[in-house]
Structures are given as C-alpha cells and as structure tokens.
Image: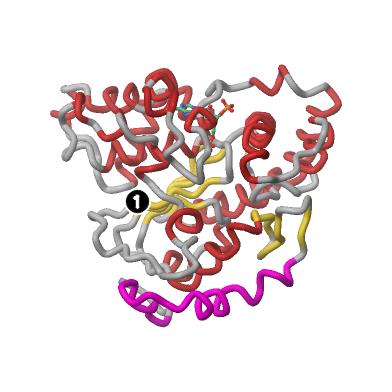
C-alpha cells in the first residue's frame, strides 16, 4: 500500500467534537459561497454541509491497493453504477438471485460516499477495517480533490459521465424534489437554473471541469481510471460490463458467460428492475432522508429535448465544444 499521509487517529478512539471540527473546519467558513448552500473549494461548488466530510476524507481516508472508487458528478447514473459495481464485484458471494442484497437495499446503502455518509461524522473518523475486500466507495469529488492516498495507491477508479443536457435536466428535477428537505434554494425558473449550470455554478460543478479531470487521467493512466459514458452503457451494456470486469481484474470466465452471468447483472441492475423494487419505490433509507424514488426518474437518453429550448441547446453545446474539444471528448 502506497500511503504518504500521516496515519489517521484511531477510529475507536472518539475525538472530542471540538478537536475534529477545529482540525478540519477552519477553512470552511472562509470559502466563497453561492446560492446560499454551495461553497467553492478547489475549483468546484460543493454543498457547504458536505464540506466537513470533504476535508475529513482528504485528510484521513487511506486507500487500500485493491479499493474500488466510483467517481461521478451528480445525476450521471451513479445509482446505476453503484448497483453494477456491487453486483459485479460480489457476484460469487451472491449466486442465489432471490437473496441478492440489491433486492432489499437501495444501491446507495450498499456503496457509500466517502465525503457523504462515511466521513460526515464530526465526532470521529470512521472505522473501515471491517469492510470486506475489495472495498467499494463512491465520491462526487473531482480527480483534483481526491485524497493523496487514492492517487498514490494502485486502487482503481471507475468514472461515469453523461451528456450535459440530460445531466442538467436530471439535476433540475432532483433539486426541485429535494430542496425542501435540505432547505436549499432553487432558482424559480429552469432558465435560471440552466444559466447557473452553464456558468459552472451547480452541484459539484463546473460539470465540464469535473468530467475532464477524470477523462484526462483515464488517458494518462488507463490502468487506473476507467472512463465510461452513460449513453455507451445504455447502448452496449454487455460489451461495457465485460470491459469493466476486465479492468477491475474480475473478468467473466467462459463458464460464467455461458451461464448468462453477464446478462443476470445487467437485468438485476436495469432501471426497470431496480425502480420497481419495493425498497426503491417506497423507502427513504439510502442517504440523508432522500426518498429512494428520487434516484429513479426515467433513466432514458435524450429527455433534455422535452425541456430545453433551441437557444438553451445551442448554448450548452457551445460550452461543451469549448471545454471538451481540445481534450478530444465528444457527446
Ligand atoms: P433521469 O433523471 O434522467 O431519469 P444519479 O444516480 O447519478 O443521481 O443519476 C440519476 C439518473 O440516473 C436519473 O436520470 C435516473 O433515473 C438514472 N438511473 C437510475 N438508475 C438507473 C438505472 N438502473 N439505469 C439507467 N439509469 C438509471
């Protein structure tokens, strides 16, 4: 394990609340803010209430060599890929399809966010030693903000992205749904929200910079960062699931392929299947009291056409072209 950070305080030993808040909290209040709930940190707009978790993650999370980290900007299919990664990596443990944990748990409950659930507790650093290997985590942090031990170790990163117009529409629906719960203010009109998104002021935005941070790293270190588009997975799930398995060092054997294990995972994790399960249709157990249904809306490509005007489409395409062109990334 390649780690160069000072060891974290033992998880079992509770820190005095004041101690940890003081250690990680000093920077937070001085950060620039927007919309009353976002803080600008290392080039990205992060919910202020998550900032403690972000800084604690950077400071204390120690990657293991075989950890797997799902890295996404919100609304690009994180929930889907949490399910896929969990099912893929644990496929030998859960051979009985009737007893699979995804049937009774929302994917977010099986694969936690580092800076979200795990490092949010202001009183202690979490004890992750009991987790089975390979450990699976998720993050909405950009590559630039990942803990040093993640970058230095051989742990793998799976990065998913999505067409910016569909991402925006998905985000707009989601924020309108959960704003009351978090007490966050959303703009009155979709146009205003869209302008904010295009100028980079959005949840973990700028969207384009976030995506680019992983895209560039995937070009430089293809053995470390696997980069995939939501649309590609929708179109050719079998091909990409097999590529993902190979990248993670858990390729499907010919026997598994013959027995239909690739399709089993695709079907188990499909929008149709997951969204209809009782736990996802009714529960709110996943994170911070958000209804599990909020993570399943349509799951389609191209829904933006029902919401954006031609001017909005052109504006978004212009920003995408400007930001992605030289990096060779196309949508
Ligand atoms: P829409 O709002 O366009 O329907 P995230 O998980 O990153 O928050 O992204 C949520 C988006 O992924 C939503 O998009 C949601 O419907 C879609 N989604 C959730 N589960 C999915 C699945 N199993 N397959 C495809 N898309 C899925």
- Asked if the magenta segment contains residue 16, the reply would be yes
Against 148, residue 74 (above or below) is above
Residue at 77% in and 24% down: 308
Taking the view exactly as shown, the residue that stands out farthest to the right is 311
Left or right, 253 with respect to 115, comes to left
Per the rendered image, the range of residues in magenta is: 6-31
Give the percent coordinates (x, y) of residue 212.
Answer: 62, 50
Against 102, residue 3 (above or below) is below
Residue at 23% in and 41% down: 90
Say if residue 150 shows up in the picture: yes
Taking the view exactly as shown, the residue that stands out farthest to the left is 255
Against 96, residue 2 (above or below) is below
Image quadrant where residue 95 sits: top left
- Neighbour class for label 1 at 10 Å: few (<14), some, many (≥20)? many
Is disc 1 placed on a helix, strand or loop? Answer: strand
Say if residue 222 shows up in the picture: no
Residue at numbered disc 1: 136
Question: For the C terminus, which image quadrant?
Answer: top right
Give the percent coordinates (x, y) of residue 321.
Answer: 74, 39
Left or right, 145 with respect to 91, comes to right
Front residue (pair 295, 316):
295
Question: For the N terminus, which image quadrant?
Answer: bottom left
Residue at 68% in and 33% down: 176
Image quadrant where residue 34 sits: bottom right
Give the percent coordinates (x, y) of residue 152.
Answer: 42, 69
Give the percent coordinates (x, y) of residue 44.
Answer: 68, 57
- Asked if the magenta segment contains residue 314, the reply would be no
User: Is label 1's Cβ within 8 Å of ligand 1?
Assistant: no
Q: Which colour scheme is used?
A: secondary structure
């Amino acid at each position: 394990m390649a780690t160069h950070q000072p060891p974290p305080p033992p998880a079992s030993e509770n820190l005095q609340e004041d101690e940890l808040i003081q250690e990680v909290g000093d920077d937070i209040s001085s950060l620039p803010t927007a919309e009353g709930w976002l803080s600008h940190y290392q080039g990205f707009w992060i919910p202020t209430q998550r900032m403690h978790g972000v800084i604690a993650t950077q400071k204390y999370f120690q990657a293991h060599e075989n950890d797997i980290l799902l890295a996404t900007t919100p609304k690009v299919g994180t929930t889907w890929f949490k399910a896929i990664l969990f099912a893929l990596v644990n496929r030998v443990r859960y051979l009985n399809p009737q007893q699979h944990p995804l049937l009774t748990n929302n994917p977010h409950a099986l694969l936690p966010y580092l800076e979200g659930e795990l490092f949010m507790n202001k009183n202690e650093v979490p004890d992750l030693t009991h987790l089975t290997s390979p450990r699976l985590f998720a993050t909405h942090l950009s590559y630039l903000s990942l803990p040093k031990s993640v970058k230095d170790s051989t742990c793998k990163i799976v990065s998913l992205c999505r067409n910016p117009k569909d991402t925006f529409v998905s985000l707009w629906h989601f924020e309108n749904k959960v704003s009351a719960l978090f007490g966050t203010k959303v703009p009155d009109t979709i146009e205003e929200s869209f302008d904010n998104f295009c100028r980079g002021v959005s949840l973990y935005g700028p969207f384009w910079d976030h995506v680019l941070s992983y895209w560039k790293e995937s070009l430089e270190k293809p053995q470390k960062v696997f980069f995939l588009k939501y649309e590609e997975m929708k179109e050719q799930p079998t091909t990409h699931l097999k590529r993902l398995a190979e990248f993670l060092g858990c390729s499907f054997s010919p026997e598994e392929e013959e027995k239909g294990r690739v399709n089993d995972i695709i079907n188990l994790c499909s929008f149709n299947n997951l969204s209809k399960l009782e736990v996802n249709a009714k529960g709110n157990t996943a994170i911070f009291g958000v209804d599990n249904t909020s993570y399943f809306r349509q799951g389609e490509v191209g829904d933006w056409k029902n919401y954006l005007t031609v001017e909005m489409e052109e504006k978004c395409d212009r920003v995408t072209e400007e930001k992605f062109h030289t990096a060779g990334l196309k949508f």
